[in-house]
């Protein structure tokens, strides 16, 4: 049965309330981390330095192995995303945004001042028009 317009609007308002509530923050962070892991894996599948496969460098042949490597130590994910600073070289705009969100979250948890990653991303590879402020991404 198709939903009425009123029912769709009600559900949409419910989703907005959940996203705006403090209780929804952890789920949003998990989703942001998941997007970053997939961005890291997409980069991992491209040729590494000198055309060498990253899998030959780090031994991770599957996403599950790569995720396990990131989970092995609490700092591994943050270290992996920070490796793309300052210019997010080699990433697509979508991948750069996903990784920048995790960097922003890490900075917030460390009570560090916010960074403005958009200024650091090469405008040729990552158009500024595609970039959203940090507050809009979470």
Image (tube, helix red, strand yellow):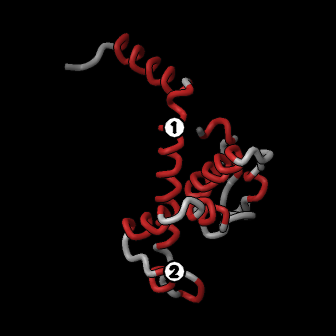
Residue count near mark 2 (Cα–Cα under 10 Å), binned few <14, some 14–19, many ≥20:
few
| 34 is higher (above) or lower (below) than 12 | below
Q: Quadrant of the N terminus?
A: top left
Read off the residue under disc 1.
26
Image location of residue 41, percent across then percent down: 47, 66
Where residue 54 appears, as percent x and y from the top left, is 50, 80
Residue at point 60%, 40% (across, down): 137
Secondary structure beneath dot 1 equals: helix
Horizontal side of 79 relative to 62 (left or right) equals right
Closer to the camera, 127 or 25? 25
Q: Quadrant of the C terminus?
A: top right
Residue at 49% x, 80% y: name it: 58
Is 93 above or below relative to 55? Answer: above
Pick out the residue farthest to the left: 1
Q: Position of residue 93 (x, y in %)?
A: 60, 56
Furthest residue toward front: 73
* Image position, residue 20 (x, y; %): 56, 25
- Which residue lies at the image location 51% right of the left edge and 37% below the top edge? 26
- Residue 47's disc is 2
Which numbered mark, 2 or 1, is in the foreground of this view? 1
Instruction: Give left or right: position of 56 versus 74.
Output: left
First-in-chain label (2 vs 1): 1
Instruction: Identify the secondary structure beneath mark 2.
Output: loop
Q: Is residue 40 visible?
A: yes
The CA distance from mark 2 to mark 1 is: 34 Å
* Looking at the image, residue 29 lies above or below residue 11: below
Q: How many numbered discs?
A: 2
Asked if the residue at tag 1 contacts the one at tag 2, i.e. Cβ–Cβ closer than 8 Å, the answer is: no
Residue 129 seen in this snapshot: no
């Amino acid at each position: 049965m198709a939903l009425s317009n009123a029912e769709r609007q009600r559900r949409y308002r419910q989703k907005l309330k959940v996203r705006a509530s403090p209780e929804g923050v952890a789920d949003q962070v998990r989703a942001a981390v998941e997007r970053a892991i997939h961005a890291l894996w997409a980069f991992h599948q491209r040729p590494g330095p000198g055309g060498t496969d990253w899998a030959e460098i780090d031994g991770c042949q599957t996403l599950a192995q790569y995720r396990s490597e990131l989970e092995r130590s609490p700092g591994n994910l943050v270290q992996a995303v920070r490796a793309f600073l300052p210019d997010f070289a080699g990433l697509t705009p979508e991948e750069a945004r996903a990784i920048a969100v995790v960097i922003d979250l890490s900075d917030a948890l460390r009570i560090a001042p916010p960074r403005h990653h958009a200024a650091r991303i090469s405008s040729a590879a990552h158009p500024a028009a595609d970039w959203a402020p940090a507050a809009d991404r979470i």
